[in-house]
Image (spheres, rainbow, N blue to C red):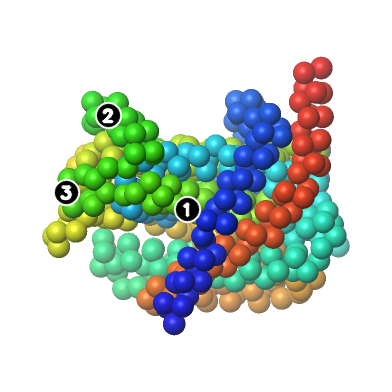
Amino acid sequence: MIDILGKISSFVWGWPLMILLIGTGLWLTISTRGFQFRILPHALKLIFTAHNEKSGDGEISNFQALMTALAATVGTGNIVGVATAIAIGGPGAVFWIWVTGLVGMITKYAEALLAVEYRIQRPDGSFAGGPMYYIEKGLKCKPLAIAFAIFTVFASFGIGNMTQSNVVAESMKSTCELNPMVTAIIVIVLSAPALLFGIKGIARITSVIVPFMIISYILLALGILWVNAAALPGTIALIFKGAFNPTAAAGGFTGAILIQTIRAGLSRGLFSNESGLGSAPIVAAAARTTCPVTQAMISMTQTFIDTLVICTLTALLIISSGSWMETGADGNSLTGLALTTAAFNQCYGAWGKHLVSIATIFFAWSTLIGWSYYGEKALEYLSNGRGIMAYRLIYLSVIWLGCTMKLNTVWTISDIFNGLMAFPNLIALVLLSPFVIKKTRDFSKNRKQ
């Protein structure tokens, strides 16, 4: 069974999807004349100023919407995913991770713009939006919208819940020898207040936790780079050289052909920042704003922070420390969490593994509560608002399964549904791109005047 699922996952996350993801970003970049690069400084400034906006429609501030989206995006992919990409494709894979971030910013921008433009206000006063709404209202294709919503609900239980809770349980077991069942109870108790109070509860928690965990991780990573400062020029050179000319290295790394390097970088980068998957615009639609372009620019910074800042720091500390060429006790190259841990151990000694464990726990838990909102809004679309409390209770109970089960199969199934989410969303982005381009050009023209 796992072999069949693995083949399905490889097919879904094959070259057609990655070409569509990157191609959509390139098309939007060219069509908007590199808008994400020109407007990035202003967009970063908006993070700290636009959240004071009081007059717009919405449930949460722009800042809270960004922090909730970052909570769901900044996860184990930033620690484990980057390390896996380097282990598979060598340092050159980092270059292709950067590519996903550079073009992914405009994709995320387009998603958020459409989400705010086509959002609806429900009878209870709450707002709902995302790909299912702009597919139905913009493309007039409800079957495609329903498909996206179904894939999102399933993905929320898998990649959003069980896989994340399992990472928390494994980290607690390895560092504190805590029984996974005890971890499950702790995670459920900590998650319940956020989930049961909906987006406002989630937003309040993430707006405090996410800045703390991101800043803490950045400071720890900078500490390692400070120690390895002399190796940074060579590290940058390895990344650019390896991007187009992968070579074998010492320490058990067998080398990588070019196509393997590109695929590793693209897949792990896209997995980390989720640009094009259609998840982040669901929460962007709840933001309080009078201008869809404003919220879209703020949402765009999510990809910049996730990929071009956090993933880059992880990659640089792994390569500059030389841990990517180390081998384990079995003689095989280190990979995944062990690779990142080795880099931390070189700088922080015995504390290294504990610091990585703490960072992994925070990243995974924030993803868990962030994804609960995505699944909830997808179900709300399918059921016309019914069954939300039941979904929240089921989502909490699934945490127990995630903490206590072996999840190889769940990981694979989750990857499949995550990939399936992207297809209807990317179709909508391409077909609705004329609207995005017009809105962007109008904004640029008015801003110059």
Residue 116: percent from the left, percent from the top?
A: 77, 47
Residue for point 34% across, 31% down: 236
Q: Using residue 181 as the reference point, say whether residue 395 is left or right of it.
A: right
In the rendered structure, are the residues bearing label 1 and label 2 in contact, judged by CB atoms less than 8 Å apart? no
**Helix, strand or loop for disc 2:** helix
Q: Is residue 197 above or below residue 92?
A: below
Between residue 435 and residue 353, name the one nearer to us.
435
User: Badge 3 local density, few (<14 within 10 Å), some, or many (20+)?
Assistant: some
The N terminus, quarter of image: bottom left
Residue for point 52% across, 61% down: 13
Distance between the alpha carbons at the discs numbered 1 and 3: 25 Å
Residue 313: percent from the left, percent from the top?
A: 38, 38
Q: Mark on residue 251?
A: 3
Residue for point 77% across, 37% down: 437
Q: First in sequence, mark 1 or 2: give its number.
A: 2
User: Badge 1 local density, few (<14 within 10 Å), some, or many (20+)?
Assistant: many
Q: Is residue 109 above or below residue 442?
A: below
Residue for point 61% across, 51% down: 20
**Which kind of residue does numbered mark 3 sit on?**
Gly
